[in-house]
Image (cartoon, rainbow, N blue to C red):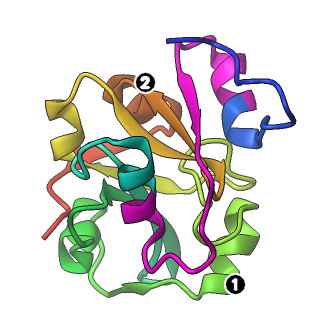
Amino acid sequence: MAKKPKKGGQGTPATVALETAAVPFTVHAYEHDPAAASYGDEAAQALGVPADRVFKTLVADIDGVLTVGVVPVAGKLDLKALAAAVGGKRAAMADPAAAERSSGYVLGGISPLGQRRPLRTVVDASALDHPTVYVSAGRRGLEVELTPTHLVTLTNAHTAPITR
């Protein structure tokens, strides 16, 4: 895996965070279709990668605290499991505008890496089953591939089964 993103203005806060941490990663770009029904499914198909290796970043509100859940695009975030993983009780998806403000990214391009305001993060335990996983690089049509261990370390996350 390369340490630097491809040329052409593809640097994002996520890729800068990866470069700063000096961990190996690969940037994968694809042509984003604004009509795509699911950003994650679109990424998996465009990159020819199994959907269980491409992870989506979802922001939830757990007892009034924004929390990130990183789950495979093939599954759905289990809000109760996410709440339990952080010792919370009430869980709901965060207001989209709050998620964008907090992360500094737009929906469909929210990366767990390089967020404007780092949030507590839980990565689905299934990520550890793969040598590398794909997450948003901070822009629609741009993914980064890295080891799940680096993802967990760089986001200060812990892992738990949070997918249903």
The span picked out in magenta is 16-42
Rendered location of residue 14, percent (x, y): 67, 39
SS category of the residue bearing label 1: helix
Looking at the image, residue 29 sits to the left or right of residue 121; the answer is right
Q: Nearer the viewer, residue 159 or 16?
A: 16
Q: Identify the disc placed on residue 67.
A: none
Looking at the image, residue 100 sits to the left or right of residue 151; the answer is right
Q: Residues within 10 Å of mark 1 (few under 14, many from 20)?
A: few
Q: State the residue at coordinates (72%, 19%).
A: 20
Q: How far apart, in angstroms, are the residues tagged by discs 1 and 2?
A: 28 Å
Residue 20 magenta-drawn?
A: yes
Vertical placement of 100 versus 52: above or below? below
Rendered location of residue 150, percent (x, y): 43, 24
Report the residue that reaches farthest toward the right: 9
Name the amino acid type tagged 1.
Answer: Ala
Q: Nearer the viewer, residue 65 or 136?
A: 136
Vertical placement of 159 versus 69: above or below? above
SS category of the residue bearing label 2: helix
Name the amino acid type tagged 2.
Answer: His
Asked whether residue 55 is in view, the answer is no
Q: State the residue at coordinates (52%, 31%).
A: 154
Looking at the image, residue 73 sits to the left or right of residue 154; the answer is left
Asked whether residue 41 is in view, the answer is yes
Vertical placement of 99 versus 150: above or below? below
Looking at the image, residue 57 sits to the left or right of residue 132; the answer is right
Residue under label 1, please give it.
Answer: 97
Q: Earlier in the sequence, mark 1 or mark 2?
A: 1
Q: Identify the disc placed on residue 150.
A: 2
